[in-house]
Image: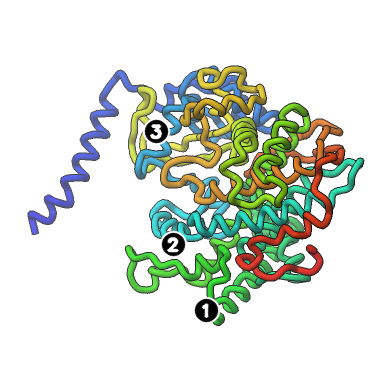
């Protein structure tokens, strides 16, 4: 018994000794020694600055040091990690950070306990079970569906007229994601209701996750709860049908149902129905919000650079060689891939990510005890002057000769919590951009405005004018874009 007690106590004593050593080291700064970002107000801290100009505030933090304190009120202080190397080391260090309960706890209540929102202790099992859904063979099938949908959607846009880019891309991304996830499991009125409820969750979930009173009988929370309830019921119905059928439809849901975790035992080896619903809603909100934002930003930037548009259109013609694009073409679309990468650098969809240190650590000669909330921001890092020359400049050619320093490019996070659907998002964005520029020349009608205080950085009220290309495919060519339909289930007649 004494030997067992000694084995249990030894690591505890070592951690306490290490912490005491850190605290006694006078060369180490404490959290209270880390400088505040300028402009803090009594009681309110930096909340007013963040409300007025969140992106300008973030971009300015790196000029004040590697670590900067940000105060969002009298009881909420975060340490912003502004150094790219430190940010990446923090993310990839095993078990060092946990999703901030203040932020991600609310997100978990709003969207369910899926892979994105679950606590660290549950993450490894969930990730093992979700990984097969993004196997390269699955991605190949998704790519055929996305390519066909993107080309047919772009062909239906009105020549010589302005479109709402945000709305059109959002609709396209959501519809193709529905078919990649559910194949033919959602059609007609049920699909339309699902899409409307999904939009309600994505639009208001971030606010409800961060504010008290989410269960009060107010219009916003009530609408959110009703939409969430309908989504979960519909997803459960589709899951029950799939379990009864017992066959693989080639979609993401089939992969989730069939997944087995060999490192778990008993019921933990499979995802339960409730866990499947959590994953479905999590993937839907994350995938549709981030990919539609990334794609809209890329096309918005291209509209202001006609020379890059022509380069991409020529590349797509060479790669496709007179046939419809497919998902297999993505690796050869070098110019499109560079544009998507540069767009993700300038406007990373997940622009801020609060985390909590799960153990004592030292960053930039500062002792940070376990429980310290830190602020990691891909938006801040992507504009770090030490990494990027003219960081505000749209320059896809920075990606031509090797990749920029990865420490400053984290649009999908890093470490064990890196977005599992990053390749799906890039695949979808690349195919949509290529398909649009196959048909149209784009020019801006207005300057985009940013939707503030959403989990995802996206433009709103972005309008583009469409000019048909002489080389645009004829209608009969577009109607042949049906490759990969077997993997996605039958077409809704309204989509033809």
Q: Which residue is mark 1?
A: 246
Q: Which residue is mark 3?
A: 89
For the residues marked 1 and 2, what is the alpha-carbon distance in whole angstroms?
18 Å
Residue lying at the far bottom of the rendered structure: 244
Task: Single out the mark in the foreground, 3 or 1.
Answer: 1
Q: From the image, which quarter does the C terminus lie in?
A: bottom right
**CB within 8 Å, label 3 to label 1:** no
* Image location (x, y in percent) of residue 298: 69, 37
* Image location (x, y in percent) of residue 63: 54, 17
**CB within 8 Å, label 1 to label 2:** no
Which badge, 2 or 3, is on the more N-terminal residue?
3
Q: Which residue is mark 2?
A: 129
Quarter of the figure with residue 444:
top right
- Determine the secondary structure under disc 3: helix
Label 2 packing within 10 angstroms: few (<14), some (14-19), many (20+): many
State whether residue 436 is above or below residue 273: above
Which badge, 1 or 2, is on the more N-terminal residue?
2
Horizontal relation, residue 69 to residue 350: left or right:
left
* Image location (x, y in percent) of residue 207: 66, 48
Horizontal relation, residue 33 to residue 186: left or right:
left
Residue at 89 percent across and 47 percent down: it is 158
Label 1 packing within 10 angstroms: few (<14), some (14-19), many (20+): few
Residue at 38 percent across and 32 percent down: it is 368
Horizontal relation, residue 344 to residue 121: left or right:
right
- Determine the secondary structure under disc 1: loop
Q: Which mark is residue 398?
A: none
Label 3 packing within 10 angstroms: few (<14), some (14-19), many (20+): some
Residue lying at the far front of the rendered structure: 321
Residue at 63 percent across and 30 percent down: it is 346
């Amino acid at each position: 018994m004494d030997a067992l007690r000694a084995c249990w106590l030894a690591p505890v004593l070592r951690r306490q000794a290490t912490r005491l050593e850190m605290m006694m080291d006078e060369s180490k700064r404490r959290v209270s020694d880390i400088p505040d970002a300028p402009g803090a107000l009594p009681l309110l801290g930096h909340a007013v600055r963040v409300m007025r100009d969140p992106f300008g505030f973030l971009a300015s933090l790196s000029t004040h040091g590697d670590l900067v304190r940000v105060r969002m009120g009298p009881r909420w202080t975060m340490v912003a990690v502004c150094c790219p190397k430190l940010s990446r080391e923090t993310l990839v260090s095993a078990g060092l950070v946990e999703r901030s309960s203040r932020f991600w706890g609310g997100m978990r209540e709003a969207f369910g306990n899926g892979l994105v929102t679950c606590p660290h202790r549950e993450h490894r099992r969930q990730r093992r079970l979700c990984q097969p859904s993004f196997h390269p063979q699955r991605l190949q099938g998704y790519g055929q569906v996305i390519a066909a949908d993107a080309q047919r959607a772009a062909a239906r846009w009105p020549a010589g007229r302005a479109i709402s880019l945000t709305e059109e891309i959002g609709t396209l991304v959501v519809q193709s994601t529905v078919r990649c996830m559910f194949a033919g499991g959602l059609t007609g009125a049920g699909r339309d209701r699902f899409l409307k409820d999904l939009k309600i969750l994505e639009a208001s979930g971030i606010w409800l996750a961060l504010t008290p009173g989410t269960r009060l009988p107010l219009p916003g929370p009530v609408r959110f709860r009703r939409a969430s309830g309908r989504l979960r019921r519909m997803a459960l119905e589709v899951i029950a049908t799939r379990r009864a059928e017992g066959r693989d439809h080639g979609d993401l849901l089939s992969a989730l149902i069939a997944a087995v975790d060999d490192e778990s035992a008993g019921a933990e080896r499979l995802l339960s129905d409730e866990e499947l619903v959590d994953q479905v809603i999590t993937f839907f909100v994350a995938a549709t919000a981030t990919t539609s934002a990334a794609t809209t930003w890329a096309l918005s930037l291209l509209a202001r650079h006609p020379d890059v548009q022509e380069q991409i259109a020529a590349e797509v013609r060479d790669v496709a060689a007179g046939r419809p694009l497919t998902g297999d073409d993505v690796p050869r679309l070098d110019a499109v891939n560079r544009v998507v990468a540069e767009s993700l650098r300038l406007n990373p969809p997940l622009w801020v990510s609060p985390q909590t240190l799960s153990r004592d650590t030292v960053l930039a000669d500062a002792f940070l005890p376990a429980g310290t909330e830190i602020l990691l921001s891909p938006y801040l890092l992507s504009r770090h002057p030490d990494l990027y020359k003219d960081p505000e400049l749209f320059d896809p050619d920075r990606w031509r000769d090797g990749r920029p320093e990865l420490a400053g490019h984290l649009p999908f996070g890093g470490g064990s919590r890196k977005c599992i659907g990053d390749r799906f998002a890039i695949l979808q964005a690349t195919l949509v951009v290529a398909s649009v520029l196959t048909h149209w020349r784009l020019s801006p009608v207005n300057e985009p405005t940013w939707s503030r205080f959403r989990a995802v950085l996206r433009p709103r009220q972005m309008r583009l004018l469409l000019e048909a290309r002489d080389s645009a495919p004829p209608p009969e060519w577009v109607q042949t874009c049906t490759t990969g339909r077997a993997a996605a289930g039958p077409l809704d007649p309204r989509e033809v």
